[in-house]
Amino acid sequence: MLSKTVPSVVLQCDVQTHPQICSALAEALQQKLPDQSLVIVDPADALEPPAPALTIRYREQNRTQDWLVGQLIWQVQQEPPVTGPALELSVMDKNLQGIDLASFAEALIQISGLRISNPTD
């Protein structure tokens, strides 16, 4: 999603390494913030001024085929970043799939303390 305007929300997520969770997080954020423009960027890329209203970074702590631990770190413009709690997801007798990651992404947003009503408040 390229645009010359500053996005309202930037999701920093390593799409190359974690394509499914990045996609699930983007979809969940779009549902929670339908009136905001959302852009996904690589966490290694520096954000150039002006800063977006809200920056959200996904940090994966551990992962196997059937187990995942991650958290969100978010920042409203120039305020200090807020680190949300880590959330764990595990499944039995199968590998983690898109449907599992969708509910994980929604729960991660829910428990993060993320200001989702209006990031410019």
Image (cartoon, rainbow, N blue to C red):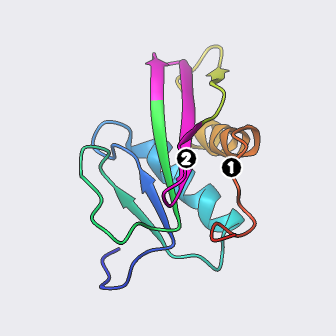
Q: Which residue is mark 1?
A: 114
Q: Which residues are magenta?
A: 60-82
Q: Amino acid at mark 1?
A: Leu
Q: Nearer the viewer, residue 103 or 10?
A: 10
Residue occupying the point 65% across, 14% down: 92
**Was residue 53 drawn as part of the magenta stretch in this picture?**
no
Residue occupying the point 27% across, 64% down: 48
Q: Which residue is mark 2?
A: 74
Q: Horizontal placement of 98 versus 34: left or right?
A: left
Q: Amino acid at mark 2?
A: Trp
Q: Give the image location of residue 115, x and y in percent.
A: 71, 56
Q: Horizontal placement of 23 versus 114: left or right?
A: left
Q: Horizontal placement of 48 versus 57: left or right?
A: left
Dot 2 or dot 1: first in sequence order is: 2
Position of 93 relative to 15 (above/below): above
Q: Give the image location of residue 64, x and y in percent.
A: 45, 16
Would you say the residues marked 2 and 1 are in contact, meaning their CB atoms lie under 8 Å apart?
Answer: yes
Position of 34 relative to 102 (above/below): below
Residue occupying the point 66% across, 69% down: 33
